[in-house]
Amino acid sequence: MQFPVFNGPVSGVAVPVSALRSKESCGIGEFADLIPFADFCEKAGFNLIQLLPVNDTGTESSPYSALSAFALHPLYLRIQNLPEAKKFSSAIKELALKHEKAERFDYTSIRSDKLNLLREIYNANESAIKESAKSGPLAKWISENPWIVDYAVFMNLKYYNFEASWKTWDKMRTPSHVEIHNRWEKESHRSGHIFYAWLQMRLHEQFQEAAEYCSKKNIALKGDIPIMMNEDSCDIWANPEFFRSDLRAGSPPDGPNPTGQNWGFPIYNWDNLEEDGFSWWKARLKSAAKYYNAFRIDHILGFFRIWSVPDGEQTGALGWTMPHQGITETELSLLGFTGDRLRWITQPHVPTKDIEAVNNYDYLGTHGLLHKVMDRIGDEELWLFKPSIRNDGDIRKADLPEPVKEALCKKWRDRVLLISGRSNKGEHEYSPVWKYYESTAWNTLSYEEKTGLEKLFREKRGIEENLWKEQAEKLLSMITSSTDMLACAEDLGDIPACVPDVLKELGIYGLKVMRWEREWDNPGQPFKDIHAYQENSVATTSVHDSSTFRDWWENEEGTEAFCKTFFPEYSEQNPPDIKPGEYNPATAEKLLTLLSETSSKLFIPPIQDWLALSGDFYPEKAGSERINVPGSVSKFNWTYRLPVTAEELKKNKDLCVAIQKICNHRSSK
């Protein structure tokens, strides 16, 4: 759907579908809950609702870990609205009683209960549904959504394999497209396949109804398209040619993540996708456009270059960007790095004493352990990893004490260069380790050697910048030209110099997380002028991976600099009527009013930051409102729910007036 024309800047709210509540919901937000939520948004003065991804994620609670690029999540189905569910009112009420009062939902429990009930409903109506799949509405829907064949066959196999990864299945691990289609047609499996097709048709109907309702209210819907696919997804299972299973996506080391991140998602094989006319990506966009006016391109930097980590690595430390420009053995030899000197900077050299120190200083015992995974260099007390050790995952599988494993994994990362490919001449190509300057080998090199290598690194980076720009222009122009939806970028992180120009050229809106928009290299690290943000951008106070604005204000650093930047009269001796560490509705109103003046065309804080305008919605601990804590795995993540129903939000006059006042203030600027 095309993005509507608004008279003036847009004010919106970000909320996961799963977080919604209504009088009709059953323990988790549903697509139908967008209808009463849109009524609240209309009264509050919002022009836009931004959602997190809504794809089926199976047993994973993270919406960024999809089992399908197309299938919607069954949890978001309003069961009592199904025409097949008329005789199941008691079971539906029981489901609601069990789950609806929980502050945060139990993903595993509610998914199991809801799917079990949906199977009961399907079984009770199987004959009619299967007949519809032959010549009725379901048959028409299937013909219009060919992706359902892969998904239904995959999910039915997954069901009979107790939801285990397809890599562990006894059959159909690497099927051809013909084999998948033949299984879809097989009568003995037909019932299971039609169940998933029926579910997806009903989900589509309910989501489309909600989207159309928002459109009638002149409220735009903004979706979220994750860049990567879960390895255990039907897309990678059915279309392995579009992915590279030898490399995993992630991010390089940074402050919060000293060993980087390894997301475990295979990277794309862009050459094969291009050869196929990017049909898979175009189909994704066409599917999303059925519901959305705008979409967020998750990790857009990955379309420029993706941090690629070899399969088997447990961290993101030993990776390189793709596309990349490798350093050849010939180039290194010209700098004097051949033989032992080349080995010194490309392979970890482990002193016996370093491992002894974590093995109770047992010299002989340490030698015995090291021989399992390493080869000794002559008579030296120095060791190299055996050729059979290909990654730190192999180290962790070895029969070694845990402290020794940890020490060896750290040593595994201790190098200047790592092999990242082969040249046309068959030579190894190398890339610098992200933190090469911290390695043991680097700190033994002469000034001349360091200078020569760094010059070579800079030359390769210059070539890579051009490669990244060329790739992004090709891929992102394909995306923006394939849809009428407004494209918005999640362009956070280590941003290549070419990114802003490419986004501007293609009309893609960048993201401004206002607490992170600072002059980091200037004294005091002042905040950037919000009135100088690029107009074609999205500004927000918080994101799903951050604390809420209240939590940041009360418990984190940066608020002192914020006050000094935006309130010139501020000083510790003479603070204004707001100050760091103290947050209340009056503070929220003043800060949101101030930030709403941003020159960004879209201003979309999350629902939690808007709710802070009312004292009715102040949990004792601000951190309890978070959606996700990156780098952690827990039942807390991704299970946030609104504290009250959408109907109650609409009736909260003070909240609606407070929001409307800010939205009107923004429109008047």
Image (cartoon, rainbow, N blue to C red):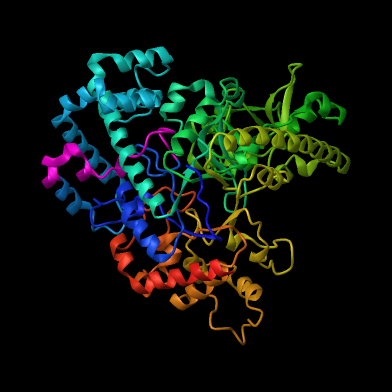
Residues 590 and 228: in front is 590
* Residue 306 showing in the rendered view: no
| The image quarter in which residue 250 lies | top right
Residues 473 and 554: in front is 473
Indicate whether 135 appears above or below 440: above
Residues 289 and 20: in front is 289
| The image quarter in which residue 206 lies | top left
Q: Position of residue 37 (x, y in %)?
A: 35, 57
* Residue 72 showing in the rendered view: yes
Q: Position of residue 9 (x, y in %)?
A: 56, 60
The residue that appears at 52% across and 75% down in the rendered structure is: 590
Residue 332 relative to residue 84: left or right? right
| The image quarter in which residue 252 lies | top right
The residue that appears at 37% across and 44% down in the rendered structure is: 61
Residue 71 magenta? yes
Q: Position of residue 5 (x, y in %)?
A: 53, 52
The magenta segment? 65-91
Residue 576 magenta? no
Q: Position of residue 596 (x, y in %)?
A: 55, 66
Which quadrant of the figure contains the C terminus? bottom right
